Image: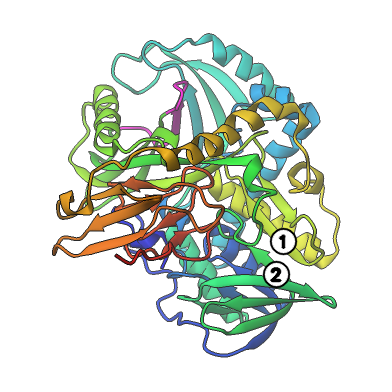
Amino acid sequence: MNVSEEQTVSLWMSVDVAPGAAPLKQDIDADVVVVGAGIVGLSTAYELAQRGYTVVVLDRGRIGMGQTARTTAHLSSDSDDSFEGLIARRGLDAARLFHQSHAAAIDRIEAIQTAESIDCHFRRLDGLLFAGPGQDASALDRELEAARQVGMTVEARHGMPFADLGEARCLAFARQATFHPQRYLRGLAAAITAKAGRLFAGTAVMGVEEKDGEVFVSAENGRTVRARHAVFATNTPTNDWVAIHSKQAPYRTYAMAFTIPRGALPDALYWDLADPYHYVRLETGPGTADYLIVGGADHKTGEADDAPVRFEALEAWTRALVPELGHEAHRWSGQVYEPIDSVGFIGRNPGNQNVYMATGDSGQGMTHGVVAALLIADLISGRSNPWSELYDPARKPVSAAKAFVSENLTAVKNFAEYVAPGEIASEEDLTPGQGAIVRKGMSKIAAYRDREGGLHLHSAKCSHLGCHVHWNSLETCWDCPCHGSQFGTDGAVLQGPAIAPLEPYKR
């Protein structure tokens, strides 16, 4: 199981990335074992297969149906946290490398979809950062200067193709891009298997051991992959218990897709200056219609359960700017990890020689994923890479000390919930489809009543580091606010860093 088992369905999920992938049923050997089959995992497997390595990819759910299937697929070499902020945190040289690496990622996607003849709707377009209604446009001046310093091709403009924003100021970033993520992953999967790579779905990884220059990755069903290298591409590491998780925080983000007459809005990427900001793009639709995709309304994972209100706000914001908007086709949510210094963690896992990881996408998961593939493939091949220090997972972000303390207060506050009362007096008070926390003596119980009336009772203690889980009524799952683990109503892991299910409660 993975997050494809959650309730919402994105615009992309109708595409089956690797329909023939089955669970691992025997012990096998490979040069490299990749854990996770999203944009990071399949891109890394592709790069290594191209270099002649034998590659095995394992995923706890269906191939390509993790968080990559819940993206909005903006491909940008801009910084999600602004270059002004990135320069302040990491310095100008680091910001330049960040831009260069993400620009290289877009170039690589373009080259691969051409070389492999992948029909994924890839196209180059402008990215437009604009001041929306009531937003302070002065930030655009500072970002213009910062973007030019890092080497981006950017120009200041006036006028946006939105209602009442005909004179609004904006910045136009050239040579950004977008694509259909699942179609792209399907092409990667085909190319990997053509190079004798092997993809295994429904194979949950429970551990990794490094010994005598080899790594042994063990699956829940008892099978083992022996390899020279292991790559954990699981959105957030499931092999590392503390080191990385204290340097990033999980956030829930929301997205909607609406029909729109083709040509009603210029094809571009759009972002505003709100906090959290809105992000908009177009996707090819049926007949004479396209889809307009809007995302935003982010909050820290587990700290709100008000998705209907957030979707309502997204729709109201979009309809006010785009009167031609048609009916809603999809709504979904996803999870991103915000690194405290605005840069992902990609490279050797701290304390290991042959185990690698990638996380901290900060809302730029598609380009971060391809940066990870290029960087990790170089590290495994023994080649130098100019981005290795920038993304080094072992770095200590001293300049982000304030953010470190702020983000880690979540865990401190969370453990205090164990002494609080339950949300309802008894599980008998649950209505069908409802989940809530119930106190049982000294224990807190995650209780859910299914649509048929059956009760599902589990410990409210996350199996990762013991934080108190919260109910997510939109996705019908349990979320851990501390590090982003998600669990199904049956207690099964949907999203790491947890690897073990919630403990069942026996009455």
Q: Is residue 74 visible?
A: no
Query: Seen in the image, is 189 located left or right of residue 437?
Result: right
Check residue 52 for magenta coloring. no
Q: CA distance from mark 2 to mark 1?
A: 6 Å
Asked whether disc 2 touches disc 1, contact meaning CB atoms under 8 Å apart, the reply is: yes
In-front residue for pair 395/415: 415
In-front residue for pair 124/180: 180
Q: Secondary structure at mark 1?
A: strand
| SS majority, magenta | loop
Q: Secondary structure at mark 2?
A: strand
Residue position marked by numbered label 2 in the rendering: 230
Q: Position of residue 400 (x, y in %)?
A: 70, 29
The amino acid marked with disc number 2 is Ala
Q: In this picture, is 372 found above or below 194?
A: above
Residue appearing at x 64%, y 55% in the figure: 241
Which segment did they paint magenta? 265-277
Q: How many marks?
A: 2
Residue position marked by numbered label 1 in the rendering: 356
Q: Residues within 10 Å of mark 1 (few under 14, many from 20)?
A: many
Q: Quadrant of residue 144?
A: top right
Check residue 269 for magenta coloring. yes
Residue appearing at x 74%, y 65% in the figure: 355
The amino acid marked with disc number 1 is Tyr
Query: Seen in the image, is 424 located left or right of residue 247?
Result: left
Q: Position of residue 497 (x, y in %)?
A: 55, 56
